[in-house]
Image (cartoon, rainbow, N blue to C red):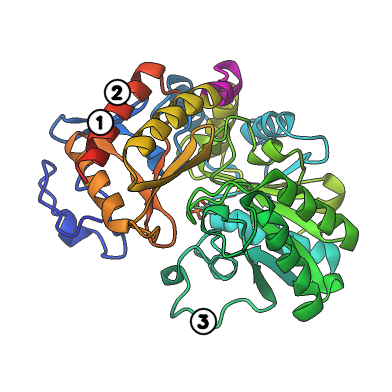
C-alpha cells in the first residue's frame, strides 16, 4: 500500500482529502481509461491488471456500455423500483437469467456486493425458517455487518467490530496448497469435507442451517480453486438436509473463470446466487438471483432499498451482458488464461520464490513462498512495486498478502499477455 500520496496534477492533495482507511496500492490519480489501459492526470499510461478489483471485465469504458449509460441518463436516471418498472431493469434481468440454469430465473437488484450477500442471507433465512449459516474460512463476502460475519479472509475486516451476526459457523475451505492434512494431496478434499460434515455432530444441527454460503473460487482469500469432487459433495450435503446453497459469484462470475459463472466449472447449480462487480462494468449494480418460488418467500416489503435496479446502472448491466455474449469474453478469458497460466508456470520453474501458480481462466494468482514454504508477502510486495515502475497495476490477495492476482479485463489480447509475462518475469527475477 502507498502511504505517502503526492500532490498531483489536479492541484488537490490526495493525502489530505482521502481517509486513511482507503489504503491504496498505487499513487496514481487516474483521469481516463480505455480497454486494459488507464491514463493518469499527467498523461502516463498504465496497464490495468487489477480491472478495478475484478470489475471492468469488458475493459474500461467499453463504447457500447458508455453509449447505454449516456442514452439512459438522458431519459430517466432514478425510476424507483417500488414505484415503477422500467425497461433497463427488465432487460438486464432477462439478459442475466438467459445466461443461467432455468432454476435461477428471478433477479432482485441491489447496489453492492455486500448488499447482495445480505439479501441472499435474508432470503435463505426467510425461505427455510432456519437461523444458521455455514460459511468458509478464507472467504470474503463484504463489509456490512452480516457480510462481515461470514467473512474470514483476514481478521482486520472483522476485528474490533464484534459482536457480529450470531449462528454463523465457519468450515475450512480446501486450500490444498496449504493443507494440514496428511496423505495424498488428491484426497485432501475428503478430509476437508469430513470436517464440514463433523460440524453437524459437534456444532449445529443440519435442520437449523438455512444455507451454506461459498465463493465458487475463493477471491480475496487467495484465488483458491476448490476440487470439483468437494464442491459436488457440498451440493449433495445441502440436498440431503434441505439446506440452500448460496454461491457468491461476485468476483468469480461474469466470465472471469473462462465460463460465464464460476459454478459451471464444477457442474453444480446453487439455489441462490449473488452477482456484483463485473455485472455493470463499473456502475454500482449487484443482484440476488434465485428461483421465483424461492423469491416468493419474500412478502412485499420484507426486503428492499431505494436505489436497487437503478435505471442507468441496469442499462449498463444489460449492455455489459450483451457485450459479454457478442464478443465471447468468457471464451477469450479461457484462451488468454491458458496462455497466462503456462507462461507463469515457466516463470515458477525458474524461480522457486513462486510456490504456486493457480487459477481458472483469467482468475489467476501466483503465491510467493520463503525457502521453507511459509508465505512470503515481502516478495509479493516487491514484485508489485517493480511492475508499478513498469506502469503495470497489480493487486495482492490471501490472508498474508502472499499472492498476486493477475486479473486483466477479459478483452486482453495474446500480445498484451505476452508483454505482461515479460515484465513479470523481470520483476520476479529481481526479488
Ligand atoms: C466474493 C465477494 N463477495 C462480496 C464482495 C463485496 O462486494 P462489495 O465490495 O461490492 O460490497 C466482494 C468484494 O471484493 C467479493 O470479492
Of labels 3 and 2, the one closer to you:
2
Determine the secondary structure under disc 3: loop
User: In this rendering, does residue 240 appear at all?
Assistant: yes
* Residue 228 x, y percent position in the rendering: 70, 44
* Residue 86 x, y percent position in the rendering: 66, 35
* Residue 132 x, y percent position in the rendering: 74, 72
The image quadrant that residue 131 belongs to is bottom right
Within 10 Å of disc 2 (Cα), the crowding (few <14, some 14-19, many 20+) is few
Q: Mark 1 — residue? A: 423
The answer to whether residue 32 is left or right of residue 336 is: left
Image quarter in which the N terminus is found: bottom left
The image quadrant that residue 263 belongs to is top right
Determine the secondary structure under disc 2: helix
Q: Who's the residue at 38% across and 36% down the image?
A: 349
* Residue 331 x, y percent position in the rendering: 58, 22
Q: Are marks 3 and 2 in contact (CB under 8 Å)?
A: no
Q: Earlier in the sequence, mark 3 or mark 2?
A: 3
Marks 2/1: CA–CA distance: 7 Å
Within 10 Å of disc 3 (Cα), the crowding (few <14, some 14-19, many 20+) is few
Q: Main secondary structure of the magenta part?
A: helix
Magenta-colored stretch includes residue 328: yes
Q: Is residue 131 above or below residue 52?
A: below
Q: Are marks 2 and 1 in contact (CB under 8 Å)?
A: yes
Give the extent of the magenta segment. Answer: 323-332
Q: Which labelled disc corresponds to residue 53?
A: none
Q: Earlier in the sequence, mark 3 or mark 1?
A: 3
Q: Who's the residue at 84% across and 69% down the image?
A: 129
Q: Mark 2 — residue? A: 419
Q: Mark 3 — residue? A: 162
User: In this rendering, does residue 30 appear at all?
Assistant: no
Amino acid at each position: 500500500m502507498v502511504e505517502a500520496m503526492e500532490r498531483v496534477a489536479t492541484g488537490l492533495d490526495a493525502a489530505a482529502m482521502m481517509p486513511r482507511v482507503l489504503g491504496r496500492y498505487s499513487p496514481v490519480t487516474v483521469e481516463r481509461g480505455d480497454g486494459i489501459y488507464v491514463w493518469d492526470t499527467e498523461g502516463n499510461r498504465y496497464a490495468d491488471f487489477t480491472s478495478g478489483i475484478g470489475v471492468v471485465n469488458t475493459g474500461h469504458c467499453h463504447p457500447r456500455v458508455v453509449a447505454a449509460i449516456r442514452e439512459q441518463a438522458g431519459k430517466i436516471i432514478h425510476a424507483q423500483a417500488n414505484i415503477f418498472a422500467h425497461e433497463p431493469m427488465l432487460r438486464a434481468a432477462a439478459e442475466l437469467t438467459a445466461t443461467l440454469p432455468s432454476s435461477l430465473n428471478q433477479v432482485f437488484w441491489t447496489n453492492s456486493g455486500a448488499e447482495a450477500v445480505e439479501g441472499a442471507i435474508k432470503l435463505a433465512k426467510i425461505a427455510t425458517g432456519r437461523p444458521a449459516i455455514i460459511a468458509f474460512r478464507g472467504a470474503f463476502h463484504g463489509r456490512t455487518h452480516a457480510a462481515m460475519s461470514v467473512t474470514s479472509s483476514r481478521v482486520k475486516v472483522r476485528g474490533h467490530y464484534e459482536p457480529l451476526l450470531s449462528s454463523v459457523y465457519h468450515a475450512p475451505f480446501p486450500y490444498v496448497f496449504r493443507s494440514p492434512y496428511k496423505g495424498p494431496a488428491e484426497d485432501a478434499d475428503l478430509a476437508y469435507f469430513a470436517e464440514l460434515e463433523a460440524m453437524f455432530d459437534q456444532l449445529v444441527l443440519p435442520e437449523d442451517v438455512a444455507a451454506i454460503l461459498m465463493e465458487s473460487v475463493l477471491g480475496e482469500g487467495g484465488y483458491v480453486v476448490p476440487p470439483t469432487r468437494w464442491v459436488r459433495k457440498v451440493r449433495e450435503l445441502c440436498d440431503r438436509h434441505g439446506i440452500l446453497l448460496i454461491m457468491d459469484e461476485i468476483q468469480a462470475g461474469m466470465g472471469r473463470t473462462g465460463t460465464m459463472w464460476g459454478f459451471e466449472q464444477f457442474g453444480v447449480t446453487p439455489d441462490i446466487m449473488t452477482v456484483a462487480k463485473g455485472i455493470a462494468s463499473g456502475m454500482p449494480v449487484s443482484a440476488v438471483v434465485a428461483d421465483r418460488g424461492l423469491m416468493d418467500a419474500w412478502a412485499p416489503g420484507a426486503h428492499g432499498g431505494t436505489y436497487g435496479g437503478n435505471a442507468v446502472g441496469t442499462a449498463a448491466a444489460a449492455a455489459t451482458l450483451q457485450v459479454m455474449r457478442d464478443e465471447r469474453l468468457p471464451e477469450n478469458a479461457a484462451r488468454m488464461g491458458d496462455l497466462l497460466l503456462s507462461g507463469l508456470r515457466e516463470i515458477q520453474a525458474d524461480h522457486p520464490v513462486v510456490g504456486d501458480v493457480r487459477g481458472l481462466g483469467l482468475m489467476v494468482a501466483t503465491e510467493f513462498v520463503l525457502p521453507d514454504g511459509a508465505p512470503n508477502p515481502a516478495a509479493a510486495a516487491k514484485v508489485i512495486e517493480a511492475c508499478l515502475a513498469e506502469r503495470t497495476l497489480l493487486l495482492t490477495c490471501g490472508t498474508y498478502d502472499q499472492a498476486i492476482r493477475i486479473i486483466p479485463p477479459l478483452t486482453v489480447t495474446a500480445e498484451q499477455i505476452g508483454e505482461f509475462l515479460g515484465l513479470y518475469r523481470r520483476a520476479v527475477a529481481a526479488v
